[in-house]
Amino acid sequence: MNRNLTIFVLLGFSLLSLFLLTLFLGSVHIPLGEIVGILIGNEPTRSVWEKIVLELRLPAAFTAILAGLALSISGLQMQTLFRNPLAGPYVLGISSGASLGVAILILATVTLQTLSGFNSTGISPLAIVIAATLGASSVMLLITFLAMKVKSTLTLLIVGVMFGYAVSGLVGILIYFSKPDDIQAYLLWSFGSFRGTGWRELKILLPCILIGAIYSIARLKSLNAMLLGDDYATSLGQNLKRTRFEILVSTALLAGSVTAFCGPVAFIGIAIPHLCRALFRQSDHSVLIPAVMLAGSSMALIANIIAGMPGSDYALPLNAVTSIFGAPVIIWVVIRQHRSLDTP
Amino acid sequence: MSSGLKTRDLTIGYRRAGKILKAVGRDLNLFLKSGELVALLGPNGSGKSTLLRTLARLQKPLSGTISLFDKPINQISAAELSRIISVVLTGKPAVNFMSVYKMVSLGRIPYTGRWGGLDSTDKREIEWSLKAMNVWQFRNRQLDELSDGEKQKVMISRALAQKPRIMILDEPTAFLDINHKHETLRLLRDLAFDQKITILLSSHDFDIVTRIADRIWMMNRNGTIQSGAPEDLFLSGGFESVFGKKGFRFDPKTGTFIFETARCGKVRLTGDETGRYWTERALQRSGFQIVVEPDEAEIRIEVGQKGTLFSWQVKTTTHQGEFDSIYRLLEFLTEKLKTPAV
C-alpha cells in the first residue's frame, strides 16, 4: 500500500513539474517566476508574456493533459474489454473513422470549389473537428451495433481492426485523387498536435472527456470482473452486453473527441496502461484508472515538449514523437508477455 | 433435505443461427441436494463442460428447464444468481499483474457497492476463503509466482468468497500433481461436509473421485446420464459400459481397471493378506491368472512376512526360488519360466 502511495505522489509531482515546464519552454524565453506570477494573476513585466502564457502555452498544456488521460483511460478499458494487450483506443477504427470524415470534408470542399469556380483560402479547423467527430462516431456506432449482435469479443476485435483497414483504404483513395495543396489541412491534422486547441475548443473537449472518464470510473467494478474473462464476469452477476456497450460509448467519447481536436495521437493509449500495470504490479482498475490518468497526462506533456523542440525554431509532428517513444514500450510488453504468459 | 438444483427434460448442446447444431445431452432429469459432492464423469467430448456451463447459466439449454430452490433459473436475476452459484472454470486465468488477495477479493463483487470497496464483512469472508483453501500464506504473492496447484486453490478460494450455495468446477484437478489433486479434492470434500456447500465437479481422475464423491453423474456417449453412489455404479456395471474397452476390463470387486494380457500361467497365492493383494495385482498385470484350487495351479507362491520385510517363495514343477521383492519375483517368472524347460 505504501509503495502505491509513493508512486502516486511521484506521478503527481512529475505531472506538476511537466506542466510548469510546458509553460516555461518555448521559442520566447519567459522567466519561471514571471510564469508563476502570471498564473496567480500578477502583472507581468511585459504584457506580451501574459498573452503567450495564457493564450498559447496554457491551453496547449491543458489539452495535452486532457488528451493524455483520455487516451490512456480508453486504452486501458479497451485492453480489459478485449483481454488483449495490443488493444488501444484506436483499435476499433476510431482514428480511421475520424480520418475518413476529414478526408471526405476536404474532398467535398475542393470539388465544390472546382465546380463553382470559387476559391476560398482553405478549410476552417472547426470544420475539420466536426468532420472528424462525425466520422469517428459513425464508425463507433457501427461497431457498438455489432457489439450487441456479436457475442465473442475476439470476433469484435478482429472486425474492428479490419474495419479500420478498410476505412484507411478509402482515405487513401481520397488522398490519391486530391491535389497536394488541397490535402494540406488533412496532413497537418493527421500529424497530430496539442497546440492547435484554444480556450474555445477546450470548452467542447473538456465536457466530452469528463463525461467519458466518469462513465469509465463508474464501470470500475465491471472492468475488474472482466479481467477474469467473459464467463467469470457473467458468473459474478455482470451484464456483459450493457457493460460492453457502455465501455464502447465511453471510448468513443474519449478517443473520438481527442482525435477530432488533436489528430490521431498514436501509442499513448496502448503504452500507458502497460507501463502502469508494470509500475504498480496491479491490474485493479481502482488503482489503474487514476494511475493512467496521471501517467498519461505526463507522457502527453513530455511528447508535447519534445515535439516543440525547445531551443530551436523547428517542431516535430507529435505523432512521430509518440510513435518513437510508444513503439519500444509495446515491444517490451510483447517480449515480456511471451516470457510470462505463453510458457505456462 | 431440500433439492437445491433440479433439471427437467433438459437437453443441452450448441446452436447456431437458431438451429440446433449439436445436442450433447438429452432429456436430463437431474438434481443436486445441498451439501453433497457430485462428480461428473464421462469420456472426452461427451458434453461434461456443456452441462456444467448450462447449469451455471453461462449457456442456454436447447430445451427443458432448470430450477434453483424451486424457482425457474430464468426468473432469477444475474445479481441474485451470482450469490447462489459460483464457478471454477478450466484453463488458467490470463491475468498478468494480480495478487492472490486481489484475485480472491474479486469473488466479493456480487456483494460490494458501486466502487467495489471492501467492508469488514468482505474482508472476513476473503480471509476465511483463503484459509479454507490453505492459501492464506500466499495472499501477498503475485498469481504468476504460484504453481498450478496453488493457483487452482486460489481460484477455488475466489469462488468460495462468492459465498455460494452451489459451486460448479470444471475439471479442477486437471494439470495438478498427485498431491495437489488429493489436497484439492479433500478440501472440496470438507467444504461440502462442513459448510453444506453443494459441489458439482467434472473430472477424469476416476480413482480419487469415486472415493470422495457422494454421487456420480456418469455421462454416457449417447447423451444420457446415470446417477448413483459410486458403489452403485460399480455394482451395476455402469462404469464398465462407458469406460470398458478392449484390452482392459473393469474389476467390480476392487473398483479398478485390469489390463488384460495373454495368459502366462495359473498361480495360486498363499500367505500374508496385504502381501497377497499387491502380488496379485502385479501378477495380473503381467498376464498371470490367479486360481483358488490347488490342483489347477501351475505355479505356487507363498508370501511370507517378517516385520516390514516380505519374501516370496515360488514353486513350480521345474523350478523353485525365494525372492525379496515383487520385481525380482516377476523377473524370475517371466524370464526363467519361458525357457523350454517348462
Image (cartoon, coloured by chain):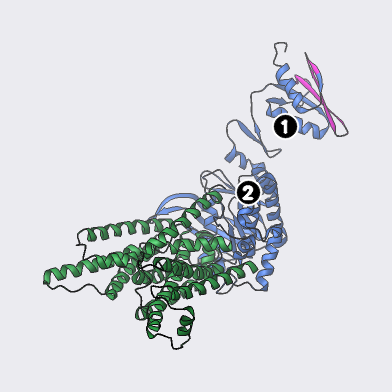
Chain colours: A green, B blue
The residue that label 1 is drawn on is B281
Q: CA distance from mark 1 to mark 2?
A: 26 Å
Q: Amino acid at mark 1?
A: Arg
Q: What residue is shown at x 70% (from left), y 62% (from top)?
A: B195
Residue B213 coordinates in the image, percent (x, y): 67, 51
From which residue to which does the magenta span run?
Answer: B295-320
Dots 1 and 2 on the same chain: yes
Magenta residues, dominant SS class: strand
Residue B112 coordinates in the image, percent (x, y): 59, 72
Of the pair B60 and B115, the residue shown nearer to us:
B115
Q: Is residue B3 above or below residue B239?
A: below
The quadrant holding residue B247 is: top right
Any part of residue A106 in sight: yes
Residue A20 is labelled as none
Of the pair A226 and B110, the residue shown nearer to us:
A226
Q: Amino acid at mark 2?
A: Thr
**Chain of the residue that carries numbered disc 2 in the rendered image:** B
**Chain of the residue that carries numbered disc 1 in the rendered image:** B
Of the pair B3 and A121, the residue shown nearer to us:
A121
Residue B173 is labelled as 2
| Side of B306 relative to B217 (left or right) | right
| Side of B98 relative to A75 (left or right) | right
Residue B225 coordinates in the image, percent (x, y): 56, 49
Do the CB atoms of the residues marked 1 and 2 lie less than 8 Å apart? no
Comparing labels 1 and 2, the label whose residue is closer to the camera: 2
Q: Secondary structure at mark 2?
A: loop
Q: Residues within 10 Å of mark 2 (few under 14, many from 20)?
A: many
